Amino acid sequence: MANNFLIPELEQKVRELLFQGLTKQEVYDRLSTYDNRDELASLLNNLPAPEPRRKYLYLNIMLISMLGIITARKLYSLWGIDTFNIFTLFILVVPTINIYLMRELMLFHRTGFQFTAILCAISLLNAENRMLPEIVFIPLIVALSGFLYYKLYPRNSMIVD
């Protein structure tokens, strides 16, 4: 696996062993030490097994694409602003959070699917998100991220320390 500076070393080792076909419990038994036991259990619970990951890859790409379209629309709304002030920074909060969520979804992190479902559902409280195309995309994003969460992270696959 290529060395990626955005992914911690322990996570890279875990991903490599999971892609070699080891179960989460086998990875935990092989890599756990007294010092990293909690971090390793948390990391393994935050990553899906390779098989469901492959199976739902295209749905995840669709989810990231829909979130990307909404993010691009939010950034495009900044195009007409002539002055830079505190309100411009407030407008940049939503695209920044969306970009972080897309990163988490690309890495198939459990928290990415959880946060995406929750934050997108809450975003419907904002009036500007109840217009087209957001009114169509946001419920689809909530449903798809919830579906992927339950398919990628079944309760019986949790590592308990």
Image (spheres, grey):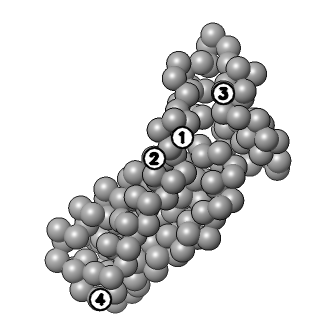
Q: Amino acid at mark 2?
A: Thr
Callout 1 secondary element: loop
Give how far across and how far down residue 100 sits, in percent.
Answer: 48, 57
Measured as percent of width and height from the top left, residue 39 is found at 56, 25
Return the x and y of residue 103 as percentages of the image width and height: 55, 58
Image mark for residue 25 = 3
The Cα–Cα distance between marks 4 and 3, rounded to whole angstroms, is: 45 Å
Question: What is the distance, in whole Å, between disc 4 and disc 2 at their CAs?
Answer: 28 Å
Q: How many residues crowd around disc 3 within 10 Å: few (fewer than 14), some, or many (20 or more)?
A: some
User: Label 1: few (<14), some or many (≥20) within 10 Å?
Assistant: some
Q: Mark 2 and mark 1: span between their CA atoms?
A: 7 Å
Is residue 10 visible in the rendered image? The answer is: no
Q: Nearer the viewer, mark 1 or mark 3?
A: 3
How far apart marks 1 and 4 lie (CA) works out to 33 Å
Q: Under tag 3, what secondary structure?
A: helix
Q: Secondary structure at mark 2?
A: helix
Q: Which residue is mark 1?
A: 46
Residue underneath mark 4: 132
Image marks 1 and 4: residues in contact by CB distance under 8 Å: no
Residue visible at 72% across and 29% down in the picture: 27
Mark 4: few/some/many CA within 10 Å (<14, 14-19, 20+): few
Q: Which residue is mark 2?
A: 111
Q: Amino acid at mark 3?
A: Gln
Q: Nearer the viewer, residue 128 or 57?
A: 57
Mark closest to the chain's N terminus, 1 or 3 = 3
The kind of residue tagged 4 is Leu
- As measured in the structure, the alpha-carbon distance from the residue carrying label 3 to the one carrying label 2 is 20 Å
| Distance between the alpha carbons at the discs numbered 1 and 3 | 14 Å
Q: Is 12 left or right of 148, judged from the image as shown?
A: right
